[in-house]
Amino acid sequence: MCGDENMSKENHSLDIYELLDHCKNSNKNHYNLLKVIAHIHTPTNTKSTNTLPRYVQTILESKSMLLKKSVQAEVDILENFNKELRQLVKERKEKWLRVQSYEYLFFWHPLHTVELILDSMDDSFKNLRVNSKLKDVHDLKKTIDAFYKLLPKIENALKATNIPVTNIKYKTKYRALKSKCNLRNAARHVNIIKPIEVNDENIEQLRSDFKILRKCLENLD
């Protein structure tokens, strides 16, 4: 559990970084989740506030992780979190798409990878609502656990793409590209993102993407 069991509802209005200080020695999964929530709610992000979203109160009151009786509660937390994160990713992708240069791809791709991970998680949550057999609940527990392990890399990708469009330099491009590769490789390792299957329908698009990526790498400096 994050903080004291008797934390009052007044904590709902705590500054997000005060909350992190409360939770730093508590549940590692929830702490990593709260770090990404902190990024979403920093003043530099669009429509952000210093007031915590309501679902964070559920995290404060959570005594355990991934127990059979709490899977649905955990899903509720993550669905709210995913919705917020998806909105941030959407806004930031749109910002980079407005850059009149191929260099936007360095910053667009890490965000797209985060979006693919959110898509995969949402599909898992929908499956639980349709089919709640014990095996499916067990599989979902494993997926949720894998998702929590990705959170530090998701946070890195968000930080790497949270720069002014006027600050595109070798260092920032390299950091963004590295965050994307690390996140995608980790997501594939835990089967949250599946390897791309090459077929007649997507081969031309993949060739085009490869050419653009090669151009980016050639012009990295």
Image (cartoon, grey):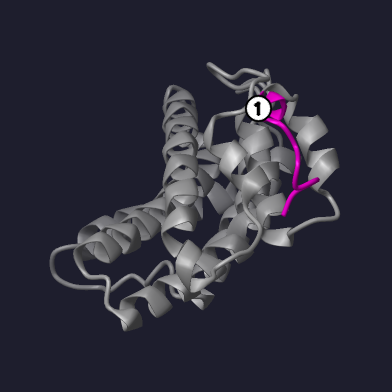
Residue 178 appears in the rendering: no
Q: Secondary structure at mark 1?
A: helix
Answer left or right for 151 relative to 78. Answer: right
Which quadrant does the N terminus fall into? bottom right
Is 27 above or below relative to 131? above
Is 40 above or below relative to 61? above
Q: Quadrant of residue 202?
A: bottom left
Give the amino acid type for the residue marked by disc 1 in the picture: His
Which quadrant does the C terminus fall into? top right
Residue at image position (26%, 58%) is 126
Residue at image position (43%, 22%) is 98
Q: Which residues are magenta?
A: 1-12
- Residue 194 vs residue 65, the one in the foreground: 65
- Residue 19 included in the magenta stretch of the image: no
Is 167 above or below relative to 213? above
Q: Where does residue 152 sit, x and y in percent of width and height?
A: 68, 55
Q: Where does residue 140 sit, x and y in percent of width and height?
A: 41, 71
Q: Quadrant of residue 41?
A: top right
- Residue 10 included in the magenta stretch of the image: yes
- Per the image, the residue denoted by label 1 is 12
Local crowd size for mark 1, using a 10 Å CA cut-off: few (<14), some (14–19), many (≥20): some
- Residue 76 vs residue 62, the one in the foreground: 62
Dominant secondary structure of the magenta stretch?
loop
Residue 103 appears in the rendering: yes
